[in-house]
Amino acid sequence: MGNDPVDKVDYSGESWDDIVKAVKNFFTPPPAPPPSPPASPPQGMPHGPFTPKPDNKPGSFQGPQQPKGQGPRSQAQWVPPEGQGGPPGSKGYWKGKGPGQEGAGGPWQRYDQSGRPITPGEAHPNPMPESGPAGAAGRGAAAAGGGAVAEGVGATTALTVGAVVGAVICALACFVPEAH
């Protein structure tokens, strides 16, 4: 044993996988905590003013109490950007319902971060690539009414499943012994 500090570490009983994992964990920074949602919806958003909705997830707000018989309060919900856990393509936006539009029956209106109304397409821009084989195939099949991507299945899921199926077929074709 020399004077190198590594020589003084006892690795007995450790597998190389455990050692590699420990080294990777040492050099990998911990994940950053998710950012907090905005403190309140923007001033220009209709059906306010809003206050945090008690006993609900962060970013949930409710409007003023409604007169008796006029339904539940208005609602506002922060939807984070894609990189912070939001849906694909989201840049962060607000969605809201007016008074009495509780539950699945009432439509959500979407608003940008300044409180201006936006369309669902503006809130969730299409994350599919515009060029290349995957984008072209998806657009061509959709335009022709084909079923390249099943309804309700995202493009990423479809491409992932396709790649896995392709790899399995390739493995079978490559490793099946030739007939003599």
Image: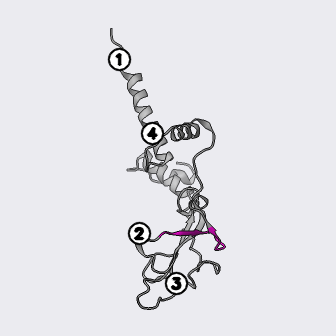
Residue 114 % position (x, y): 66, 73
Disc 3 and disc 1: Cα gap in Å? 69 Å
**Mark 2, residue position:** 104
Residue that appears at 57% across and 83% down:
48
Extreme bottom residue here? 68
Quarter of the picture containing the C terminus is top left
Q: Which residues are magenta?
A: 107-117
Q: Which mark is residue 147?
A: 4
Relative to 62, residue 29 above or below: above
Disc with the residue nearer the chain's start (4 vs 3)? 3
**Marks 3 and 2, the one that precedes in the sequence:** 3
Whichever of labels 3 and 1 marks the residue nearer the N terminus, that label is 3
Name the element at disc 1: loop
38 up-or-down from 92: above or below: below
Sequence order check, earlier mark of 1 and 4: 4
Please state which of the two labelled residues, at mark 3 or mark 2, is closer to the viewer.
Answer: 2
The reply to whether the magenta stretch includes residue 141 is no
Q: Which mark is residue 63?
A: 3
Question: Which label sits on residue 177?
Answer: 1
Point out which mark residue 141 bears. none
**Looking at the picture, which amino acid does disc 3 mark?**
Gly
